[in-house]
């Protein structure tokens, strides 16, 4: 049979839960054996689940709408350990390939393993910021404001840069902090200003200052940077400054071209003997199980290998749950820990760590 709905009434909360018919039958047997009501058993199960994930530090607790309250949520502090931040930018010169989902999923799963994570949103659309509860950039506490301050200092030949901690916010996830994006990053003048500052710095970029200041905090093990699909000066600066680049691509020629442009940029910078990120690898993302798609993955993999670009073995399938839970500010790998998409991202994280350390 299909799925059935149950109305469960408690003193304070009344809600409707949809469970499988098999679960309903097993619940009836359990209720009889324990002499308990369905609502009592479900309430106990919810309590056990909340305790489990809260203790793991990844349970996404509700946030208030007040940004001052949000940013105090789980702010990481010095713990006496030596956290050497490894920075990874998630990039592709094509939209819709899963950059934000990749950054968020890797962050949540790494935090679950006890790692201290900082996320940086470099996309003016603020999708990553929204996903972690921030949608308002009016207070100037974001990456654009910090970069602007750095650019002013560069122009004045003043290396007394502001404390990067001033723009770091807490999230509802233990061990995950974030620097949010700003809609101001869409402004062409913003990119032009970064270019002028980079020309002044010569061997560095403005984003090198950002990464350097983050490392000085000694708080984070990994910094995951979500980028826009535009190869603008902000993204190019971050690629030069980061330790590693990961490029998700869908199984599409445009996705392949977008990844190849990233690789071409990295190789061109290396020829100038200037610091630039290493290419950690390509993630084949949003692959469905159709015969044509299954055949295309090895073909794309072969082309990347021929171009001396590493490809991760894990292929992330196209699953509706990912996009649906992003819309509701929920992250699939957290709310569905046993789902196959979570298992795929867990395997991917293991591969990524093996490459980047």
Image (cartoon, grey):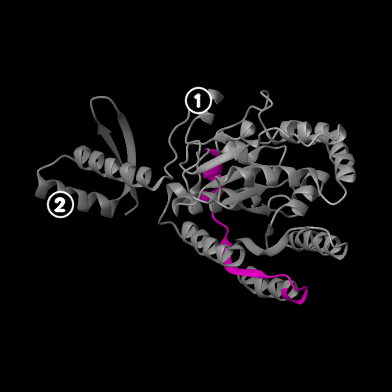
Picture quadrant where residue 68 is located? top right
User: Which range is magenta?
Assistant: 305-328
**Residue located 64% across and 64% down the image:** 284
- In the image, residue 324 above or below residue 271: above
**Residue located 85% across and 62% down the image:** 273
- In the image, residue 74 above or below residue 290: above
The residues tagged by marks 1 and 2 sit, at their Cα atoms, a distance apart of 45 Å
The 10 Å Cα crowd at callout 1, few under 14, some 14 to 19, many 20 or more, is few
Q: Position of residue 203 (x, y in %)?
A: 85, 52
Q: Position of residue 182 (x, y in %)?
A: 71, 33
The foreground one among 85 and 7 is 85
In-image side of 33 versus 124 (left or right):
left
Residue at numbered disc 1: 69
Which mark, by number, is residue 157? none
The foreground one among 52 and 82 is 82
Residue 61 in view here: yes
The foreground one among 59 and 120 is 120
Whether residue 309 is in magenta: the answer is: yes
Q: Earlier in the sequence, mark 1 or mark 2?
A: 2
Which mark, by number, is residue 29? 2
Q: Position of residue 236 (x, y in %)?
A: 80, 50
Residue 93 in view here: no
In-image side of 12 versus 308 (left or right):
left
Picture quadrant where residue 261 is located? bottom right
Which label lies toward us, 1 or 2? Answer: 1
């Amino acid at each position: 049979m299909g799925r059935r709905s149950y109305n469960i009434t408690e003193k304070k909360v009344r809600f409707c839960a949809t469970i499988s018919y098999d679960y309903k039958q097993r619940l009836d047997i359990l209720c009889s054996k324990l002499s308990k009501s369905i609502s009592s058993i479900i309430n106990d199960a919810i309590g056990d689940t909340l305790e489990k994930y809260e203790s793991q530090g990844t349970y996404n607790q509700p946030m208030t709408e007040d940004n001052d309250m949000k940013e105090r949520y789980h702010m990481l502090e010095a713990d006496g350990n030596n956290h050497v931040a490894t920075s990874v930018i998630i990039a592709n010169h094509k939209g819709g390939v899963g950059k934000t989902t990749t950054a968020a999923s890797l962050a949540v799963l790494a935090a679950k393993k006890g790692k201290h994570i900082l996320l940086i949103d470099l996309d003016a659309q603020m999708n990553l910021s929204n996903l972690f509860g921030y949608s308002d950039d009016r207070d100037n506490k974001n990456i654009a404001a910090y970069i602007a301050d750095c650019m002013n200092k560069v122009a004045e030949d003043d290396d007394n840069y502001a404390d990067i901690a001033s723009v770091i916010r807490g999230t509802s996830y233990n061990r995950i902090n974030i620097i949010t994006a700003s809609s101001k990053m869409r402004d062409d003048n913003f990119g032009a200003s970064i270019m002028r500052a980079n020309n002044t710095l010569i061997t560095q970029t403005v984003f090198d200052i950002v990464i350097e200041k983050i490392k000085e905090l000694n708080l984070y093990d990994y910094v995951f940077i979500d980028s826009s699909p535009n190869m603008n000066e902000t993204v190019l600066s971050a690629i030069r400054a980061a330790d590693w680049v990961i490029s998700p691509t869908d199984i599409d020629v445009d996705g392949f071209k977008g990844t190849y442009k990233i690789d071409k940029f990295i190789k061109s910078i290396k020829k100038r003997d200037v610091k630039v990120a290493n290419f950690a690898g390509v993630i084949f993302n949003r692959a469905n199980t159709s015969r044509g798609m299954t055949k295309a993955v090895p073909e794309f993999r072969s082309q990347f290998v021929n171009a001396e670009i590493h490809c991760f073995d894990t292929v992330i399938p196209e699953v509706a749950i990912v996009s649906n839970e992003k819309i509701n500010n929920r992250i699939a790998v957290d709310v569905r820990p046993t789902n196959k998409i979570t298992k795929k991202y867990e395997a991917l994280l293991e591969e990524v760590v093996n490459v980047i350390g």
